[in-house]
Image (tube, rainbow, N blue to C red):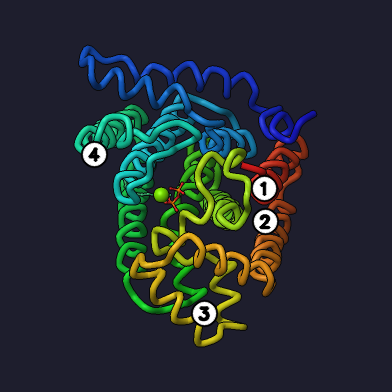
Amino acid sequence: MTPFEAIVSPIEQEYRLFQSLYAEFAVTDNPLLREVLNHIVHKKGKQMRPILTFLFAKLFGEIGDSTYNSALSLELIHTASLVHDDVIDDSSVRRGQPSVNASFGNKVAVLSGDYLSALSMLYMARTDNAQMARVVGQLAQTLSDGELFQLFESRENVVSEDIYYHIIKKKTAALFSACARLGAISADASPDDVEIAARIGESIGLCFQIRDDIFDYSDSTATIGKPTGSDMREGKLTLPIIYAIRNFGTDEMNSMITRLKAGELSDDEIHRLINFAIENGGVDYAEQVMDGYRQKVLALLANYDNKVVVDAIVAYLDYAIHRQN
Ligand code: FPP
Ligand code: MG
């Protein structure tokens, strides 16, 4: 069994049905919008976030209509946020193909992202459940808040691990947390179990982002689907370089960070910073941090005896930590 098969094995049928339901969002009589939506559907990724919703519904009870509707809503808001993010970051590649902004321009990308957000709300409305709709509303607030905070932070001359966690909690972990939370709510889990699900989702999301950030320090652009060093090029500091600078930063390195934030570094200097982070244990440290979150998740999962689903959630966590792209 591949790691991915281990993750989806308890929810295989539901995942397949979800995928066919998801493809329906590209149906529209607007030709330009249809082209954009087909472009997005063409590289839809593994859709890891809805999988988490299904796994948590299965952990606590039955997968039902509100599980599907919230999974669809969450995947759509996630997709909308990536379309907008690529405009903000001026990124030309997403999932190994041209980003929407690269193919269709910024105006079309912003409006298509808005369209996907609106669809996301419509799917939540189908649940007829205000508690569930509130989760997605709050998530949209948190994502935008996190992205704005990151934008502001990348202009400030600070190197802080706390700020890093603050950003990744908002921009990434909040989504995974909402996925787990809505899965649990959709299966009528108790309030305590819903909170535990949300905490597990958050820790998985933190690992997911830390791994994503580590990719930026590797040298295999081909497998990752986007250029390495791109976070630094965008003025973003991630855990490996934050650790190395905080613990071993020289005056020269600190002044490079100031220039990084101003977007003034050459490719050569970015490579020097990447090597500095690796040589000073920054990537190893980030791996240790992920292991800390892994232990927390295992302790929380010990409350539950549905072994088939618990094992799949652990496989999911390990995938978030060890994935190659
Ligand atoms: C990717 O981060 C971006 C996010 C995880 C969140 C983006 C959120 C917004 C743009 C807010 C929009 C909100 C709504 C409701 C539509 P990254 O740039 O670090 O990762 P990347 O390398 O994959 O681009
Ligand atoms: Mg980006």
**Marks 1, 2: nearer the viewer:** 1
Sequence-first tag of 3 and 4: 4
Q: Where on the picture, by quarter, is residue 206? A: bottom right
**Marks 2, 4: nearer the viewer:** 4
Residue 259: mark: none
User: Mark 3 and mark 4: span between their CA atoms?
Assistant: 35 Å
Q: Where on the picture, by quarter, is residue 26? A: top left
Q: Is residue 291 left or right of residue 214?
A: right
Q: Is residue 208 left or right of residue 5?
A: left
Sequence-first tag of 2 and 4: 4
Residue behind mark 3? 253
Sequence-first tag of 1 and 3: 3
Q: Position of residue 233 (x, y in %)?
A: 42, 59
> Are the residues tagged 2 and 4 within 8 Å (C-beta)?
no
Residue behind mark 1? 317
Closer-to-camera residue (180/145): 145
Residue behind mark 2? 297
Q: Amino acid at mark 4?
A: Asn
Sequence-first tag of 1 and 4: 4
Q: Under tag 3, what secondary structure?
A: helix
Q: Under tag 1, what secondary structure?
A: helix
**Residue at position x 44%, y 18% from top?**
21
**Marks 3, 4: nearer the viewer:** 3
Q: Position of residue 137 (x, y in %)?
A: 31, 46
